[in-house]
Amino acid sequence: MDILSRLFDEMHLQKVQYITVKARGSWQLVQSRQDYLTFIVVISGEVHLCYGNDNNDRQVITANNMMMLTTQGSYACQSAPTVSKVTAKTIMPAHTEGQIGLEIDNTDSGHKVIAQTNNAQSNHAQSNHAQSNHVQDNEAQFIVVRSQFDADMARPLLSALPTSLPPVTQKHSAYNDVVHIGLQFFLLEVGLERPGRTTMLERLAGMLMIECIREYVEQLEMASGSKDSINHTTDNTLDRTPSWIDHPWQRDNDADRSGENNAISNGDGNGNWLAALKDPYLSNTLYLMHRYPEDAWTLQGLAKASGLSRSGLNERFKQSVGITPLAYLSHYRLRLAARFLRQEQYSISKISELVGYASDHSFSGAFKRRYGQSPSHYRKAHSRKSKP
């Protein structure tokens, strides 16, 4: 397994929710701030996506294309660059589950908005319509998919990504084929009441995420002119702590992270975190730390396993990631420990062992410095949050 695949697994996409939309005329669907990854997949027509600060960032998503939002802010899907706020409807209310279809017809004065439960017949009809690409009355058909994820484990990856991806492209690539096949597969699963549907939809959401990120990285490589140029860093990357290594208890819940999410284009301390994934030496180093966090790694041991000298690995890793390999390992171990605590799978002593600490005392001290509370208090706090 490569390091990117392991990172995707650690993000743990779950509790996938979705809504299918068929809209005509002038319309707008809005969604307030949420703790989800969101995908907008267009079946036919086009959708104008507005997001970012005051929804000032805009993208047009055309048929058989999709957009992934890595930010947890508000956004709007609408029929045109600007529409009347009077037509706004909420995309997906909090805690909505199951399959829901939304039909909006604003082509006449009736302004009809009809919510209905999807069935196999209606979704097969949507699938057939997608294949014909026949659009009338400024009609758009699309699916909004959202999924919960482990935000703490995902932060290093998401902090290196823009707010939306992949970039708009006119070229034909594997991305187009994957989106088309994935869309048909998703419509089929939505329309049929088959055992295992929940798991299948979670896997499909993961597939959408992976394809968006892969296309983004590949377009970065083409824009830079070669696969190696993504590894080049600017001098100001050195000695700067990446913004994803802040303390969770110090973060403002309503803080705007759009600057963090646009790290690559802005060239700040996060700007080349993805470069480590493209560097064969560093990707191997990352894989070893993620795969065997319990091992007693030293800089010399990591360097030998990765085929570099100690100084070479230390400098190369710090240039790309923003911190040294051992500092990264420490942060990763504690994020992994926090995940185990939230899942309540193991005892604290076992977690200490799993993440490579020599004693419960050293683990507890390190965890408290990172998360502001002891492992036992952290577990109790998150256990209470999970209960109704």
Image (cartoon, helix red, strand yellow):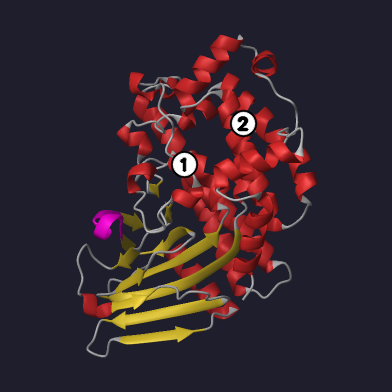
Mark 1 vs mark 2: which is more N-terminal? 1
Residue 13: x percent and y percent? Answer: 60, 56
| Marker disc for residue 246 | 1
The amino acid marked with disc number 1 is Asp
Element class at badge 2: helix
Residue 134: x percent and y percent? Answer: 37, 67
| Marker disc for residue 28 | none
- Packing grade of label 2 (10 A; few <14, some 14-19, many >=20) is many
**Quadrant, the C terminus:** bottom right
The amino acid marked with disc number 2 is Leu
Marks 1, 2: nearer the viewer: 1
Q: Quadrant of residue 304?
A: top right
Which residue is label 2 attached to? 329
Q: Is residue 6 above or below residue 138?
A: above
Residue 167: x percent and y percent? Answer: 36, 44
Q: Quadrant of residue 44?
A: bottom left
> Where does the magenta region start and end?
50-59
Question: For this view, does 30 lie left or right of residue 177?
Answer: left
Which one is nearer the viewer's eye here, 156 or 359? 359
Q: Is residue 319 magenta?
A: no
